[in-house]
Amino acid sequence: MIRIITDSVSSIPADVAAGRGVEVVTLYVNRAGTEYADATMDLDAFYADIHAMVDDIPTSSQPSQAVLEELFEEAALAGDEVLGVFISTGLSGTFEGAVRAARAVKARNLDFRCILIDSTSCGYDEAWPVFDAADARDAGDDLAACAAAVHRGIESTRFLFTPESLTFLKAGGRIGGAAALLGNLIQIVPVLTVTDGTTATLAKVRTRKKALARIVDTLREDVEAHGLKRIVVHYIGDKAPAVQWAREAIEPLVGRAVDVLPVSPVIGVHVGPAVGIVYECMSEIVGKITGGAAAERELVL
């Protein structure tokens, strides 16, 4: 059996993960001395007072190597193969921890077969390739073919989002104070994306309304060029604006109902209130990955 494992930053709801036969290992968020398991916490309740967090941004931690080793050891002893897809190494050390754990288990279980993949992203930009792996596994594909499906998925997805302001990004050291001040004063609003595993700026516009319109325009262009396979609206903070945007702007464009889901706080507390979309196209989106071959983002044991 192939066991598909991902981390909680993929933002897959527990019932969805269970329904797809995907195992989720949790990361943790620490706020004011209280630690929350990202995989099981009430995200909307946590985000209810997100504006109060800007002066003391919560910290996060990855799963311990012991937890990952236990998970892989269980699979090895059962004779199962493992396909792990984890948050970008540019955002967390979770993938490196999984690599160390898998190598330790392999040293004790020489027949253990495992492929670990750096998703180069987070949220449903990480989840869609996980679902591609589940689709391949359920169709009877072997471990290598399932891993190939993940890589195709990574290259065919796009994450577009716009923060309410630059305040959290400035407080977390993601941008300089002067840049944040200038942006907020003259209403420069970025449209952000993920390229080669790190956050990149797709566009800078003058208002949030224009930022949301630019996201819709980019979605339309990608769908016309590559077709649409899956889509979700993501949010950080208040859900209501995201739901409204999904119903008024995204669903009429794609012609289907669209789920509206929160992004993991492991990422969200560093961005602040935001809304965006993650979609997977039927073919590769040029420019999503520019920094090397798929093998460089993969460990095969």
Image (cartoon, grey):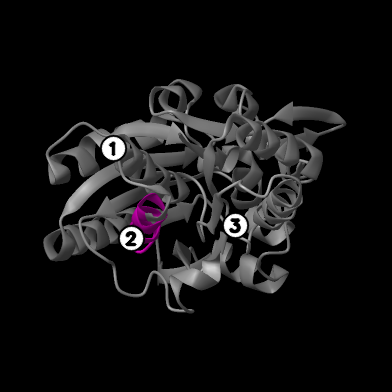
Q: CA distance from mark 2 to mark 3?
A: 20 Å
Q: Nearer the viewer, mark 1 or mark 3?
A: 3
Examine the structure image and report whether residue 152 is included in the region drawn in magenta.
Answer: yes
Q: Residues within 10 Å of mark 3 (few under 14, many from 20)?
A: some
Q: Which residue is mark 1?
A: 246
Residue 207 horizontal/vertical position (percent): 39, 59
The residue range painted magenta reads 145-158
Q: Which residue is mark 2?
A: 152
Residue 67 lies, with reference to residue 151, above or below; the image says above
Earlier in the chain: of badge 1 and badge 3, it is: 1
Residue 131 horizontal/vertical position (percent): 37, 41
Q: Nearer the viewer, mark 2 or mark 1?
A: 2
Question: How many badges with numbers are in the image?
Answer: 3
Q: Which residue is mark 3?
A: 301
Q: Is residue 14 left or right of residue 77?
A: left
Q: Quadrant of residue 79?
A: top right
CB under 8 Å between discs 2 and 1: no
- Give whichever of 64, 45 is nearer the camera: 64
Which circle marks residue 8 in the picture? Answer: none
Residue 153 lies, with reference to residue 46, above or below; the image says below
Earlier in the chain: of badge 2 and badge 3, it is: 2
Q: Which amino acid type corresponds to the residue marked 1 in the rendered image?
A: Ala
Q: Which amino acid type corresponds to the residue marked 3 in the rendered image?
A: Leu
- Give whichever of 290, 77 is nearer the camera: 77
Examine the structure image and report whether residue 249 is included in the region drawn in magenta.
Answer: no
Q: CA distance from mark 2 to mark 1?
A: 26 Å
Residue at image coords 27%, 66%: 284
Q: Quadrant of the C terminus?
A: bottom right
Residue 263 horizontal/vertical position (percent): 52, 40
